[in-house]
Image (cartoon, rainbow, N blue to C red):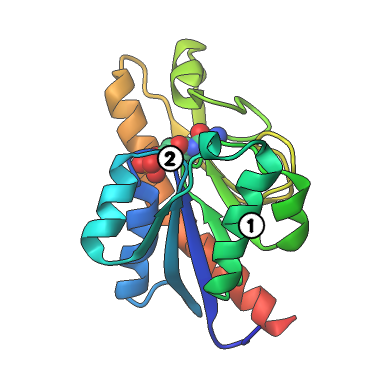
């Protein structure tokens, strides 16, 4: 791997706002040695259309086109190798990874989660924190292992839940922090890898 340039794959299943924030950070010179090369989606989703419109190499790799999880991930791994990818950012990619991908990219897969892990892992973390009337929640960026939103934490940032705040406003505040914290954490993690 080049220590000057980390070739990044973005993985998404949804709106793709985090993938867009990472891409924009690169354009603005805020992504350190990382350059996004590829977008991988497991379903037809707004993120995929964004990548295609941009002209980013964008792949739809649907689990149901493969007999099992392992062969689905092997197809993804083949794409990553074709594009000589060094680093992966899960950006709202709503599938657990298997040992195949986690093993091939150990310490090189990051994820963002819209809560202060280990609180509220899994889906709908913003809604669940809101309904629990917590005084604050936040955002976590962590390394990925085979568990659900587990793996060593790299960065966290708190977001207050203001009394009387609507769920929409709370979600928007969380997403604003995500869009800042994820690119910044990716950049600093890549700097650390480059110096290792
Ligand atoms: C983000 O809020 C991300 O933190 C969350 O999915 C959303 C994707 O939004 N991820 C998880 O909940 C992972 N467990 P986006 O597609 O607009 O980036």
Mark 1 touches mark 2? (CB < 8 Å): no
Q: Quadrant of the C terminus?
A: bottom right
The location of residue 32, given as percent across then percent down, is 48, 77
Question: Which residue is drawn at the image coordinates 48% and 40% (left, top)?
Answer: 62
In this rendering, is residue 58 above or below 158?
below
Question: Which residue is drawn at the image coordinates 28% and 24% (left, top)?
Answer: 168
Label at residue 6: none
Label at residue 13: 2
Q: Is residue 142 visible?
A: no
In this rendering, is residue 161 above or below 37?
above
Q: Is residue 168 visible?
A: yes
Callout 2 crowding tier (Cα within 10 Å): few <14, some 14–19, many ≥20: many
Instruction: Work out whether mark 1 precedes mark 2 in sequence or the reverse, and give the earlier one.
Output: 2
Q: Quadrant of the N terminus?
A: bottom right
Residue wearing tag 1: 109
Q: Does dot 2 land on a helix, a strand or a loop?
A: loop
Q: Residue furthest left?
A: 53
Q: Is 156 on the left-hand or right-hand side of 147?
A: left
Q: Nearer the viewer, residue 173 or 179?
A: 179
Question: Which residue is drawn at the image coordinates 33% and 39% (left, top)?
Answer: 45
Question: Which residue is drawn at the image coordinates 59% and 27% (left, top)?
Answer: 122
Q: Does dot 1 land on a helix, a strand or a loop?
A: strand
The location of residue 108, given as percent across then percent down, is 67, 63
Q: Nearer the viewer, residue 172 or 14?
A: 14
The location of residue 175, given as percent across then percent down, is 37, 40
Callout 1 crowding tier (Cα within 10 Å): few <14, some 14–19, many ≥20: many
């Amino acid at each position: 791997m080049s220590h000057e340039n980390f070739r990044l794959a973005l993985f998404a299943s949804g709106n793709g706002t985090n993938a867009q924030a990472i891409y924009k950070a690169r354009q603005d010179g805020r992504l350190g040695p990382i350059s996004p090369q590829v977008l991988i989606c497991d379903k037809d989703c707004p993120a995929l259309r964004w990548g295609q419109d941009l002209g980013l190499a964008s792949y739809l790799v649907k689990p149901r086109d493969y007999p099992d999880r392992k062969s689905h991930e092997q197809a993804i791994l083949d794409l990553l190798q074709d594009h000589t990818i060094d680093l992966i950012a899960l950006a709202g990619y709503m599938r657990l990874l298997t040992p195949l991908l986690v093993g091939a990219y150990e310490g090189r897969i990051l994820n963002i989660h819209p809560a202060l892990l280990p609180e509220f892992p899994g889906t709908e973390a913003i809604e669940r924190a809101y309904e629990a009337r917590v005084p604050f929640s936040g955002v976590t960026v962590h390394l990925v292992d085979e568990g659900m939103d587990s793996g060593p934490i790299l960065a966290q940032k708190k977001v207050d839940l203001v009394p009387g705040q609507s769920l929409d406003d709370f979600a928007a505040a969380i997403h604003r922090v995500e869009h800042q914290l994820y690119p910044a954490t990716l950049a600093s993690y890549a700097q650390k890898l480059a110096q290792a």
